[in-house]
């Protein structure tokens, strides 16, 4: 009987304050959409780092004939200098860091260069003798690239050491900043949702002050009186959260999986499974947020 009464009062309150209820649903939807998007963007960054960092290499370029770099002032790297670098690659000092390596000869470098720039003016003027010998080193742990790079930098005959992660890092910096901005907007909207839920519940309670007064007179507990109002906020926030999960799932399914993943095949992407794993936390956060803001609002109202 009590349960039916509480449910009846809950839906009665939702229908009486329909406009405010819709507002709570929409604010909850948008705020949790931003929260979910921020978390999924961080997941995407992790997926891309794991995928790309496994492929990147540290490249050690030996001095070519035409280099104008100060480190190559003595001219093209000699065979002794190239052998010295290879000995260092195979040394016990670097053994824990290096997974495997290859040496790219002048001829191989020329083929690669012509594949990339053969049709351009610079490609037509290039010769095999202008190409550098280089070492392509794959690391056991890509995070340790500085340890390896420092061993080769400044050695005789070495023109430059390039870590391919340096090309990728600016992209990850941009993505991280977008994620932080999204997270900041989510925090602002979450605060807006809390304030709106508190206001809505307070107005709902005030509109039914006569009924709640009678309930107090007959000895009803505070929890019994407040529970319908708290459920109003929780149901409205839950509906908004379900909408945000549905929007995130649709975005992951139709934008990421069906479009981006088919157009940009050079990297891995998150999928709908990531959204489904995030969904319970979004729903739980919506309910807890609504219950806490409602309880706080009603406790103040009760004191009045």
Image: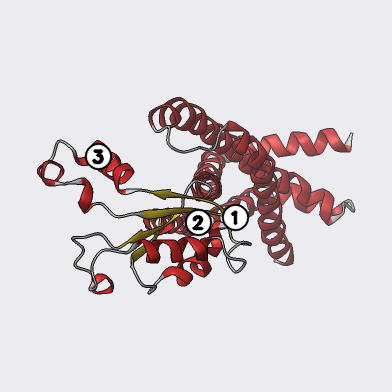
The answer to which of 107 and 113 lies nearer the viewer is 107
| Relative image position of residue 116 (x, y in whole percent) | 25, 39
Compare marks 3 and 1 and give the one earlier in the sequence.
3
Residue under the point 67% across and 42% down: 283
| Relative image position of residue 187 (x, y in whole percent) | 52, 58
Q: CA distance from mark 2 to mark 1?
A: 34 Å
**Figure disc tally:** 3
- The disc label shown at residue 28, or none: none
Residue under the point 21% across and 51% down: 129
The reply to whether callout 3 and callout 2 are in contact (CB within 8 Å) is no
- Judging by the rendered image, the residue that carries numbered circle 2 is 183
- Judging by the rendered image, the residue that carries numbered circle 3 is 116
- Judging by the rendered image, the residue that carries numbered circle 1 is 140
| Relative image position of residue 281 (x, y in whole percent) | 68, 46
What is the residue that sits farthest to the front in this orientation?
A: 80
The answer to which of 27 and 270 lies nearer the viewer is 270
Q: CA distance from mark 3 to mark 1?
A: 29 Å
Compare marks 3 and 2 and give the one earlier in the sequence.
3
- Is 205 located above or below residue 161 in the figure? above
Q: Between label 2 and label 1, give the one nearer the viewer.
A: 1
**Disc 3 secondary structure class:** helix
Q: Between label 3 and label 2, give the one nearer the viewer.
A: 3
Label 2 Cα neighbours within 10 Å, binned few <14 / some 14-19 / many ≥20: some
- Is 297 located above or below residue 281 in the figure? below
Q: In the rendered image, which quarter contains the C terminus? A: bottom right
């Amino acid at each position: 009987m009590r349960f039916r009464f509480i449910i009846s009062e809950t839906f009665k309150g939702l229908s009486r304050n329909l406009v405010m209820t819709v507002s709570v649903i929409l604010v909850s939807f948008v705020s949790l959409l931003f929260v979910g998007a921020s978390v999924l963007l961080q997941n995407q960054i992790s997926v891309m780092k794991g995928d790309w960092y496994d492929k990147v290499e540290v490249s050690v370029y030996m001095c070519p004939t035409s280099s104008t770099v100060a480190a190559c002032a003595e001219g093209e790297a000699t065979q002794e200098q190239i052998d010295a670098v290879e000995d260092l690659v195979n040394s016990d000092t670097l053994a824990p860091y290096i997974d495997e390596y290859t040496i790219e000869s002048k001829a191989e470098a020329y083929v690669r260069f012509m594949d990339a720039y053969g049709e351009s003016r610079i490609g037509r003027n290039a010769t095999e003798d202008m190409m550098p010998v280089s070492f392509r080193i794959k690391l056991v742990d890509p995070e340790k690239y500085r340890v390896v790079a420092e061993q080769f930098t400044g050695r005789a005959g070495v023109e430059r050491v390039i870590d391919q992660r340096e090309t990728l890092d600016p992209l990850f910096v941009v993505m991280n900043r977008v994620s932080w901005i999204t997270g900041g907007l989510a925090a602002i909207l979450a605060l807006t949702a809390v304030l709106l839920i508190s206001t809505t519940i307070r107005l709902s309670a005030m509109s039914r002050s006569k009924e709640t007064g009678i309930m107090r007179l007959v000895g009803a507990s505070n929890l019994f009186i407040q529970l319908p109002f708290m459920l109003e906020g929780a149901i409205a926030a839950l509906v908004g959260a379900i909408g945000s999960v549905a929007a995130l799932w649709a975005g992951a399914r139709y934008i990421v999986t069906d479009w981006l993943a088919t157009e940009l095949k050079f990297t891995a992407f998150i999928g709908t499974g990531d959204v489904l794993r995030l969904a319970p936390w979004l729903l739980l956060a919506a309910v807890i947020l609504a219950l806490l803001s409602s309880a706080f609002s009603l406790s103040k109202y009760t004191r009045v």
